[in-house]
Amino acid sequence: MDYILIPGEREIVVKQQDTYLKEQWNLTGSHDGGTSRCKQAFWLQHISDADRNVFLVQAVDATGESHTAVWIADFVDRTIMKIGPEHFAGLVCDSTGNTLGSRTVMSRRHRIILIFPDACHHLSSQIKDIVKLPYFAGVIIIVRATLTFFHKSHAGIHAFAQARKDLKISRALDAIGKTRFASIIYSARSIQRNLLAFQRIFRRTNLNFDYQEEFEPMLRDDETGAPNLAAIEFQSKLGQLISIGLPAARVIACLESNYATPGDFYLLWHAMIGGTLDVVQSTSQNSRFPVEVQEKVRAIIHYRHAQVFSESGNLYTPAYLAAAYLNPGQYHLGALIVEF
């Protein structure tokens, strides 16, 4: 019966959904591809209406397809033409490979629809660029090793749970995920949050973990009270990694709201730039970055900014600035000209 009832019910739902969407205006479409645990490729398409309701309109198995820009554009176009291009205000997708090419194809087919690069993916790309700097290579290795060890070692899992219970630390470790934005920053922050638990574990439990010294107090507990250089370097750079990534991570969290607008991205992007530069240019003795790292971070920010907001950028669109300017709630932007 499931071969009859489920497809039949699906057709009823799709028909009602299409009828509703054909009566709506200012729709926004989004699409993205992925791979299942069985290594099968799939593509999804969603549509949001003006009331922020989100509809899944397509889900196709694309394992046997060549995901060219034209194929992706044709996939998206099936729904647009069924509902009517005049009902759409915008389309958004990430900027990886052929997905970026599909945006170009769609912009030529439908001149009346605004085409947006995905803001959250763009911010995530900036975080990835900063994390890849050689300055952070050592701390990233230790973060990944720590997450792996305390996820797989039974003795480590037990000791960590007991230490958190004793110290009343409610939140555990956050894994580095493939689909969650800024997960490396949240993972690093979770390790920093549990430093006291790790120190308790390594004092009381004999674990075969390669980086125990990095988690010890910065001043040794022995008679000398000498500085622990390995701990100082790791814990200081861990704090720097978190502080330099948090502005972008917080903006991503804001923009993932269903109520975020293109104008919000314009404002929050510039707020993120200010917050990140404040961190990297700080003269505080405990968080000072080397000059060459400051220059590389500024270069990354400038490059990512120019991609979207400069007319020569490969992701350029004036729509974000226009949306911020035309928002009646942001009237103070009328006399604001931002140059970066």
Image (cartoon, rainbow, N blue to C red):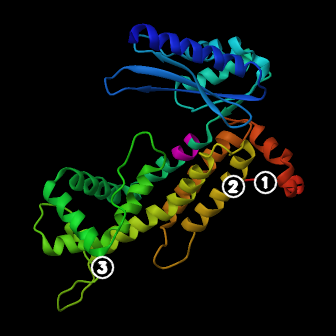
Q: Amino acid at mark 3?
A: Met
Q: Are the residues at dot 1 and dot 3 in contact (C-beta closer than 8 Å)?
A: no
Q: Residues within 10 Å of mark 2 (few under 14, many from 20)?
A: some
Q: Amino acid at mark 2?
A: His
Residue 270's disc is 2
The answer to whether 10 is drawn above or below residue 293 in the figure is: above
Q: Are the residues at dot 2 and dot 3 in contact (C-beta closer than 8 Å)?
A: no
Disc 2 to disc 1, C-alpha distance: 9 Å
The answer to whether 118 is drawn above or below residue 284 in the figure is: above
Residue occupying the far bottom of the picture? 223
The residue range painted magenta reads 121-125
Task: Determine the image quadrant of residue 232.
Answer: bottom left
Residue 338's disc is 1
Residue 218's disc is 3
Question: What secondary structure predominates along the stretch shown in magenta?
Answer: helix
Q: Residues within 10 Å of mark 1 (few under 14, many from 20)?
A: few
Task: Determine the image quadrant of residue 143.
Answer: bottom left
Q: Earlier in the sequence, mark 1 or mark 3?
A: 3
Q: Earlier in the sequence, mark 2 or mark 3?
A: 3
